[in-house]
Image: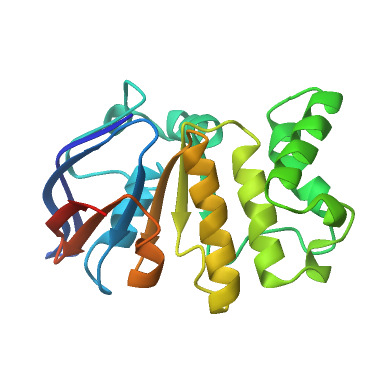
C-alpha cells in the first residue's frame, strides 16, 4: 500500500538547512495498523504531512497504492488527498453550527457523489462510530469524543486507501481517548489501513506496529 524509499526532507531558510527526515525507508501493507512515534522535533509531523500529500519530499520516493506521489504536481496531490487519504486531526476540523450528518456529507458533495448515496453513506459511517442518535445534532452540541467520531466518519466517507490520524486523541480525556482508539481497532479489524501519529505510548499500544523516529531517523520498527 505504501512504499517509502530513502526519503529525506530538508527545509532551507536563506543559507541554513534543517534536516527534518534523513534517508528513511519503510513499507506499510494493506490492512496494517501503524503508530508513528517520536518526541517533538523527531520528524513525525513532517512525515505525516508527506504521507498525507500535504508536503513534498526533498529526495527519495513515496509510492501510494502503486502511484509515485513524489512526482506529482499540486493539483494531482490534491486529488490524492481527496480520493485516497482519510484525515483525522487533533482539532476535529468540523463546521460548528452544522449537523454531524452534514459534516460527513460535505466531502462527498464536493466530490459529486449523488445525494441519496452520500446520505446513505454518511448514516452508515455515523452508525459505525456509534452516533446513530446524534446525526442531527450540531457539532458544537457534541462532546469532544463525539466530535472526533464525526471526524472519523467523515474521513471514511470517501472510501480512502488509508486513514491518517494526527494526534487524534490529543484533545480528549483518557476515557474518551480509549473509546476513539477502540473505534480505530474495530476499523482495522474490518480491513482498513490506519496510520496514527502520536507521542503517547498509551495510544501507540493500540497499533499492531510501532515506528519510532528520532532526529529524522527511524530508530525502531517493531511489531506490537
Q: Residue at x 28, y 74 (%)?
A: 40
Q: Residue at x 80, y 69 (%)?
A: 140
Colour pattern of the rendering: rainbow
How many numbered tags mark residues here? 0
Residue 145 in sight in this render: yes
Q: Is residue 37 left or right of residue 82?
A: left
Q: Residue at x 73, y 53 (%)?
A: 130
Against 161, residue 49 (above or below) is below
Splitting the image into 4 quarters, where does residue 1 fall? top left
Please identify the residue farthest to the right as the structure is shown.
136
Residue 200 in sight in this render: no
Residue 214 in picture, x, y percent from top left: 15, 66
Work out whether residue 212 or residue 75 is closer to the camera in this orientation and state it. 212
Residue 28 in picture, x, y percent from top left: 28, 37
Against 139, residue 202 (above or below) is below
Work out whether residue 156 or residue 131 is closer to the camera in this orientation and state it. 131
Work out whether residue 135 or residue 71 is closer to the camera in this orientation and state it. 135
| Screen quadrant of the C terminus | bottom left
Residue 20 in picture, x, y percent from top left: 19, 60
Q: Is residue 150 left or right of residue 138?
A: left
Against 106, residue 69 (above or below) is above
Amino acid at each position: 500500500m505504501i512504499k517509502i524509499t530513502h526519503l529525506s526532507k530538508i527545509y532551507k531558510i536563506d543559507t541554513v538547512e534543517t534536516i527534518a527526515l534523513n534517508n528513511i525507508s519503510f513499507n506499510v501493507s494493506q490492512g496494517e495498523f501503524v503508530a508513528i512515534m517520536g518526541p517533538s522535533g523527531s520528524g513525525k509531523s513532517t512525515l505525516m504531512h508527506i504521507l498525507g500529500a500535504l508536503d513534498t519530499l526533498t529526495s527519495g520516493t513515496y509510492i501510494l497504492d502503486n502511484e509515485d506521489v513524489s512526482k506529482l504536481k499540486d493539483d494531482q496531490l490534491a486529488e490524492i488527498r481527496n480520493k485516497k487519504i482519510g484525515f483525522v486531526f487533533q482539532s476535529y476540523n468540523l463546521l460548528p453550527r452544522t449537523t454531524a450528518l452534514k459534516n460527513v456529507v460535505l466531502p462527498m458533495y464536493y466530490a459529486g457523489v449523488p445525494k441519496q448515496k452520500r446520505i446513505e453513506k454518511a448514516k452508515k459511517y455515523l452508525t459505525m462510530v456509534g452516533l446513530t442518535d446524534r446525526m442531527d445534532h450540531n457539532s458544537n452540541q457534541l462532546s469532544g469524543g463525539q466530535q472526533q467520531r464525526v471526524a472519523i466518519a467523515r474521513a471514511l466517507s470517501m472510501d480512502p486507501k488509508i486513514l491518517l490520524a494526527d494526534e487524534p486523541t490529543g484533545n480528549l480525556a483518557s476515557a474518551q481517548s480509549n473509546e476513539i482508539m477502540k473505534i480505530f481497532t474495530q476499523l482495522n479489524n474490518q480491513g482498513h489501513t490506519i496510520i496514527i501519529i502520536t507521542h503517547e505510548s498509551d495510544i501507540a499500544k493500540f497499533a499492531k506496529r510501532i515506528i519510532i523516529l528520532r532526529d529524522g531517523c527511524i530508530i525502531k520498527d517493531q511489531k506490537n
